[in-house]
Amino acid sequence: TDEAMIARIRDMGLRLGGEVFHRQSAMARAGDLDRLGEIAQPTLIVAADADRLRGPDEAEELHHGIAGSTLVHIPDSGHMIPLEQPKALAKVMTDWLSARPAK
């Protein structure tokens, strides 16, 4: 319902153009879910509570597939978390990074 955000995303799409949209939409993206268990690095999974492109089930699937991962949901955000909730995203990331042991 945020008209300014909708306009910002629409303008971004117009700047990129229809060719880019079609190319990205047509990309075949092979799934690697069977390989999630190979990820041994600390992993932060960030999901938006109102994302209509990537649902919470997909974030949960990643979280369950990556041992020791951290899953955080950003409230009041759709798919464009960096544009919609930049401060909340930055806080989640800095908090998570601050909790990591120093090397």
Image (tube, helix red, strand yellow):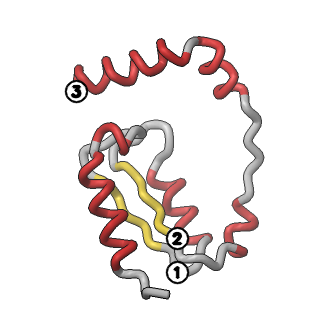
Report how far apart the C-alphas of labels 1 and 2 lie in the structure: 8 Å
Q: Amino acid at mark 3?
A: Asp
**Do the residues under discs 1 and 2 have CB atoms within 8 angstroms?**
yes
At 64% from the left and 79% from the top, the residue drawn is: 40
Tag 3 secondary structure: loop
Identify the residue under disc 2: 43
Q: Which residue is mark 3?
A: 2
SS for callout 2: loop
> Mark 2 is on which residue type?
Thr
User: Measuring 29% from the left and 39% from the top, which residue is drawn there?
Assistant: 84
On screen, residue 76 above or below 38 = above
The residue carrying pointer 3 sits among few (fewer than 14), some (14 to 19) or many (20 or more) residues within 10 Å by Cα, namely few
* Residue shown at the point (32%, 63%) measured from the top left: 92
Mark pair 3, 1: CA separation: 35 Å
- Quadrant in the rendering for residue 71: bottom left
Q: Which residue is mark 1?
A: 68
